[in-house]
Image (spheres, rainbow, N blue to C red):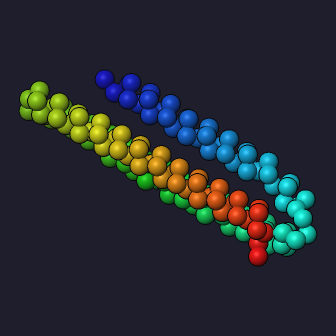
Amino acid sequence: MFDPVFDSLRKVSESVISTQQEMFKKWISFWPGVAAMEPGCGDVGKVQKKWGEVAGELLTKQSEAVAAQFNTGMKSIEEAFHLPEAKNAEELRAKTIELWRKTFDCLKGTYEAQTRDFQTAVAKWTELMTKGAA
């Protein structure tokens, strides 16, 4: 009964991880460009330090998001084990629908937060590369 749910959750998680890996690969590919910046763009050491701070903030936010998603997933699994306690079919249906809603709301919130964090990081990175560390 729950195999399709877990399979979908696994696929979504793999997709998120793959997307994050691609994002970081792209960011790292830009790193050599920092050394080739114009002298007027600011001190390279300052730019590297700020870039490291931005990357560190993003990783911290990602870690917190994964921990929150894991905790919510554990709660959902616990709730799923209580589904057989339903007294009738209507109660089982209502509990199942509520569990699905919570799960998808959690996924939606996670993706929205990741998108916001990514946009913020890209904005900071773009600002850093165009204006320098000054």
Q: From where the camera sits, is residue 60 visible?
A: yes
The quadrant in which residue 132 appears is bottom right
Q: How many marks?
A: 0
The quadrant in which residue 54 appears is bottom right
- Give coordinates of residue 76: x percent, y percent: 32, 42
Query: Left or right of 98: which side holds 15?
Result: right
Q: Residue at x 67, y 45 (%)?
A: 23
The quadrant of the image that shows the C terminus is bottom right
- Give coordinates of residue 107: x percent, y percent: 41, 43
Query: Left or right of 20: which side holds 2?
Result: left
Q: Residue at x 46, y 49 (%)?
A: 112
From this view, report whether residue 86 is shown above or below residue 127: above
- Give coordinates of residue 62: x percent, y percent: 55, 54
Query: Left or right of 8: which side holds 22?
Result: right
Q: Residue furthest left?
A: 87
From this view, report whether residue 94 is shown above or below residue 109: above
Closer to us: 84 or 114: 114
The quadrant in which residue 125 appears is bottom right
Q: From where the camera sits, is residue 49 visible?
A: no
Query: Left or right of 2: which side holds 32?
Result: right
Q: Residue at x 72, y 69 (%)?
A: 50
Q: Residue at x 62, y 38 (%)?
A: 18
Q: Residue furthest bottom?
A: 134
The quadrant of the image that shows the N terminus is top left
From this view, report whether residue 29 is shown above or below residue 81: below
Closer to us: 66 or 86: 66
From this view, report whether residue 49 is shown above or below residue 112: below
